[in-house]
Image (cartoon, rainbow, N blue to C red):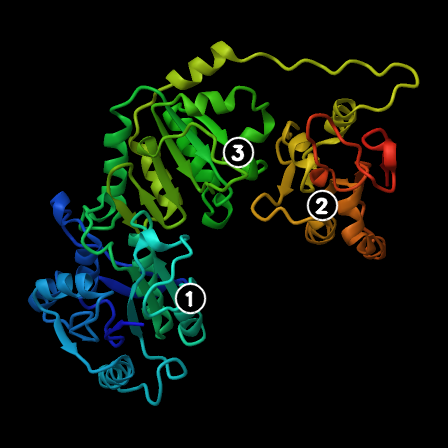
Amino acid sequence: METKISTMDSCKPASNDVCSLPSSGVSVVQNSAVPSLIASYEATLGRHLDHRFGGFGRARAVRAKLSPLATDIFSVPVDFNLTLLDHLIAESGLNLIGCCNELNAGYAVDGFARRRDPTQMILWYQQSLPVICIVGGPNSNDYGTNRILHHTGLPDFSQELRCFHAVTCYQAVVSNLEDAHELIDTAISTALKESKPVYISISCNLSAIPHPTFSREPRDLEPAVDATIEFLHKVVKQVMVGGPKHRVAKAYEAFVELADACGYAVAAMPSAKGLHLLGRREPAFCAEMVESADAYIFAGSIFNDYSSVEYSLLLKKEKAIIARPHRVVIPNGPSFGCVLMKDFLHALAKKLKSNTTAQENYRRIYVLDGLPLKCEPKEALRVNVLFKHIQALLSSDTTVIAETGDSWFNCQKLKLPEGCGYEFQMQYGSIGWSVLATLGYAQAAKDKRVIACIGDESFQMTAQDVSTMLRCGQRTIFFLINNGGYTIEVRCEEELVEAKTATRSKKDLKFNFL
């Protein structure tokens, strides 16, 4: 397929204040010294890419007597990349060199990269040359249509990606503008950090479309904080929502600091239970409070079909500030790269005005939980009664591990004491995961007693390693719930159809304890 190939100077990667070598294993795209807004009609992917390769960074580099990040683009101009090439040659400083075919362009880049970094010899990947291959991809509207396009022959647009996967250290397929900024910056940073080739495919219709994420020149903590404060201070009801990526971002303490400082109502996504102070409370009316808010700060959240209830939550993108581990996105505004979540939350805590409106609204509608009715003599054990007893077992010395399925929903209702751990696998929903996760967790946290809740059929998938737990002397408590097989697979039509399983009609009536 049609490609355009560029190379970067890896000898002085921080030379034009655009990119830098990794610090503590993380590579970044650096900031400009002075914040500046870009006219909305100019805030395009093509312009951003040109800026990253040196079009706008060149002037600063010349003033500082430094080498620009990139000087020459070796290309094969064809239909899928023409708009992108138009944007690159429209800016000053980049020299576009048209080659006769893609292979020749690749060889030219190889030679160019050798000269730019004389310590590197031989070939691309093996000899660590930071080459960027940019490909004009299918129109973004063609993805998922099962169409056959010229150059492909099949309704499979991943053929080229699979080829490049083996010879590049990072691959980015840009088929929408929402995350284009992040994908492009990550690719460039990875090329510099690893000193190896990367692959970027850009849908042919996206280069000239303006998008607010490209509307600001610098990518910096202070502008990100200022833009967030400006947005939040315009509205009345604000909420904070914590997500599971707090763990990788090491941002839990900063999240709590911000919650204490701003007074906003605070919620946690289901997959973040146990990482937040919210685990100690009942989530009644939580969804209503978040959905009715004027603005939300999503910190470390993951939005998939599970966490969004099949995308049925009444959340509006134009109200959401998204804080990721290394990026902040402002609604209908710019995207700030290379901003650590914990630094961002910590800085917000110092500047945000306190506003308890959403909290006060929550207190007005909150109703205390009722207690389950006591079991009658000879009555079958009910789920709510079982979990009442599990609740009584929890302390700072315990951790709850919930299996995919019913245990997810029942364990979410548990109120976690201070220091009580909680783990479940919401992203992948693997069947039988909790047994082995319990084995590993108990081995790593010998000061904790693990309480695991799991359905009978999931347990059958991985039950063998209970013997390993015994051999390791672990003190795990299993609540094995007899669901009569794969409950999630039972088909319900006009009325409940009894599942034909080993337990037959005893489904949901009996609990076994190990």
Identify the image quadrant of the N terminus.
bottom left
* Earlier-in-chain disc, 2 versus 1: 1
Tell me the kind of residue under disc 1: Leu
SS at mark 1 in the image: loop
In the picture provided, is 134 more to the left or to the right than 313?
A: left
Instruction: Check disc 3 and report the residue beneath it.
Output: 309
N-term-proximal mark, 1 vs 3: 1
- Taking 393 as reference, is 71 above or below it? below
Task: Find the distance from the CA under tag 2 to the CA under tag 1.
Answer: 56 Å
Camera-nearest label, 2 or 1: 1
- Quadrant that contains the C terminus: top right
Residue at x 48%, y 9% (from the top left corner): 364
Displayed quadrant of residue 53: bottom left
Q: Amino acid at mark 2?
A: Asp
Report the amino acid beneath label 3.
Val
Residue that carries the numbered disc 2 in the rendered image: 447
> Are the residues flagged by discs 2 and 1 in contact, CB closer than 8 Å?
no
Residue 487, percent across and down?
Answer: 74, 38
Give the left or right position of residue 511, taking residue 48 as reference: right
Q: Which class describes the residues within 10 Å of circle 3: few (<14), some (14-19), or many (20+)? A: few
Q: Earlier in the sequence, mark 3 or mark 2?
A: 3
Q: Residue 307, image x and y in percent? A: 52, 37
Disc number for residue 154: 1
Does residue 472 sit above or below 259 in this rendering? below
Instruction: Find residue 329 and report its image quarter.
Output: top left
Where disc 3 sits, the SS reads loop
Q: Position of residue 425 (x, y in %)?
A: 61, 45
